[in-house]
Amino acid sequence: MTPYNTLIDSHAHIYGPEFKDDFADMLKRAEEAGVGEIIVVGTDVATSRAACELATRHENLYCAVGIHPHDAATVTEKCYEDIRHMVNSCTKVVAIGEIGLDFYRDRSPRHLQEEVFRRFIRLAREVSLPVIIHDRDAHDRVMAIVMEEDAGAVGGVFHCFSGDLQMASRCIDLGFHISIPGTVTYPSNENLRQVVQGTKIEKMLVETDCPYLTPVPHRGKRNEPAYVSITAAG
Ligand SMILES: [Zn+2]
Ligand SMILES: [Zn+2]
């Protein structure tokens, strides 16, 4: 049983080589820091499968399966089938993600990012799972697609939320949560702190997005789930 007041790291990429040497210790530190559960999020077919495998092996881990917009150009019909198969065969899958649009790095052509994002929202609705949305420099298109595909029917979370307070209210009105990463501790991130101050706590989640986005005072080092307590405290 998870105690009532534990934290959940809603977004972690802990299947990579960064955690290979101290995986068990890392989980232990998370538990000691009050992190009761961790959602391991896939970014492509291979890492989604790895997330399922970890969640199957560890009671406190859950997983999300999906394909990141960076990889949209590589998505084939087989990828959708593979992800659907994971949903049907792994009981620890709690969401479809991460999916979305990244117009900051533009690693895949935008029209393909949009098509893949739509397809995964449709899959999420079909299997009745919430979505984990990645939105970087693409607020307008993400919101348009979320509306057009009626993603609010399943809801979910805007991870690493980077919009303003007005956008946060729109997301919440549509049935979504917003998730706050460790960057909220960065001195320059006044915008995100304003969003947090103006948003009801029950509509917010915290996340590490580890190994990235390490909060102060550990900034510059590898991030890990235990540090989500710093974000929550901040
Ligand atoms: Zn992301
Ligand atoms: Zn991520």
Image (spheres, rainbow, N blue to C red):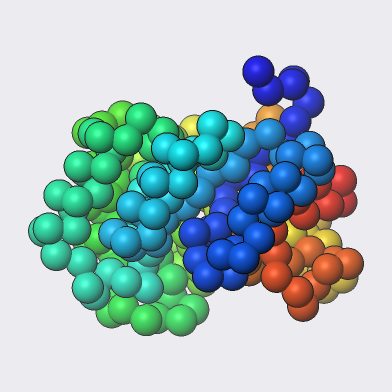
Q: Position of residue 186 (x, y in %)?
A: 82, 68
Q: Residue at x 38, y 45 (%)?
A: 52
Q: Residue at x 39, y 46 (%)?
A: 53
> Left of 84 or right of it: where is 34?
right
> Left of 222 or right of it: where is 102?
left
Total count of labels: 0
Q: Position of residue 124 (x, y in %)?
A: 30, 39
Q: Nearer the viewer, residue 179 or 52?
A: 52
Q: Residue at x 46, y 46 (%)?
A: 54
145 versus 211 height, above or below: above
Q: Nearer the viewer, residue 100 or 76?
A: 76
> Left of 118 or right of it: where is 22?
right
Q: Position of residue 190 (x, y in %)?
A: 82, 64
Q: Position of residue 85 (x, y in %)?
A: 20, 42
Quadrant of the image occupied by residue 102: bottom left
Q: Residue at x 11, y 58 (%)?
A: 77
